[in-house]
Amino acid sequence: MRLPWLSETTDKPTHNYARSGWRIPQLNLWDVYTDPNKENPELISIRTKALIQEMRANRKTSPAMRPSSSTLYNCVGLIFCSRRGHVDIRHIDAILRQDGYNEISLNECVAGDLVLYTFEGLPSHIASVSCVHMFRNQITRLSVLSKWGKAGEVEHDHDQVPVHCGVPTAYFSTRLNHVT
Amino acid sequence: MSHNKHFREIESLQFQIQFSVVGGFNILQLAMERSQTLLELRLAIAEDAKLARKIHERIALLLSKVETETQLSYDESIAAYLFCLFKESPAAAKAASKIILEHGGLWWSVQLAVYVRQQMQTELA
């Protein structure tokens, strides 16, 4: 379904490209919303708070919510489109490849690296490492910055996500010392 | 048999936030496949053809609330109802897709409605 917005404005949706020059497949938000830059921040906030409350009930540490934006983007859009796009997570393998990412182990993670989550074997979520907590050269906790789907941005322990975000499965970096 | 329990659960904030976190359309479908509540509702639709009509009415009701409701968008609830219809009563899903697409302004519901129509056109061809 295409809404008439495109013909009525000079503002064209922009594209995002991987480092290789490959165009990242992006959902055209304008096909769905009359103005995708005007998501209801109040609604995002309500949903995120409810998610955090649910997680707090079951776990020791609690995620911290960041201020909500009124622009619609998801976890992939947060990391690869600077909060400007909604990219389906099924494209994540291609994006990581086209951007030159390499898989690393959990113990090699530093801030800025990525954590990939899977749900029943399928890529389901991606987050960016924001802080590494070490004790005697071992990582004890990994804090990540996430965008939980249509909910807000959250900083949380990498293994504390809602069920449908999946489980942390792989870690990626573009640092040169990891190029094989 | 009353299905109010299922309706209440699917339309709750708790249900919506569970599904609002998904990062992709295939994950949404997989998550809905695994949902016990949706599985029960699907079984009920398979047993009682009249239930499909009731669900269509629930979708229409929720669509009418989307613009005025400030707390919930009901996107995931509507998508869940459509998913159940698509699995158990494709004709009802086609009709529901039509009203969802006419309404617009929803994320997963619109994507699922487009998918339902595409799938049904493929089957016809």
Image (tube, grey):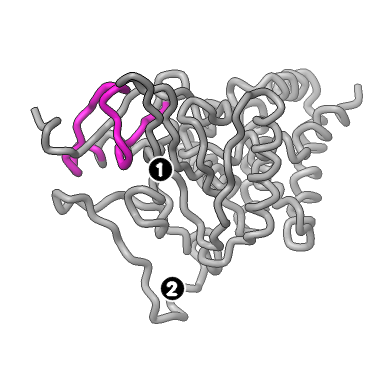
Q: Which mark is residue A126?
A: none
Percent of width and height locating residue A147? 49, 45
Tell me if mark 2 has few (under 14), some (14-19) or many (20+) residues whose alpha carbon lies within 10 angstroms of its own: some
What's under tag 2, amino acid-wise? Leu
Residue placed at 39% from the left, 77% from the top? A11
Q: Is residue A97 above or below residue A38?
A: above
**Helix or strand or loop: what does disc 2 sit on?**
helix
Residue placed at 66% from the left, 39% from the top? B17
Percent of width and height locating residue B46? 72, 20
Q: Which residues are magenta?
A: A96-117
Q: Is residue A140 left or right of residue B103?
A: left
**Label 2: chain?**
A
Residue nearest the observer in this picture, A54 or B110: A54
Residue placed at 76% from the left, 42% from the top? B56
The residue where tag 2 is placed is A6
**Label 1: chain?**
A
**Helix or strand or loop: what does disc 1 sit on?**
loop
Q: Is residue B27 left or right of residue A59?
A: left
Q: Is residue A59 left or right of residue A35?
A: right
Residue nearest the observer in this picture, B53 or B19: B19
Alpha carbon separation for disc pair 1 and 2: 22 Å
* Discs 1/2, front: 1
What's under tag 1, amino acid-wise? Asp
Q: Is residue A93 visible?
A: yes
Q: Is residue A27 above or below residue B49?
A: below
CB atoms of marks 1 and 2 within 8 Å: no
Residue placed at 32% from the left, 50% from the top? A80
Q: Is residue B105 magenta?
A: no
The residue where tag 1 is placed is A88
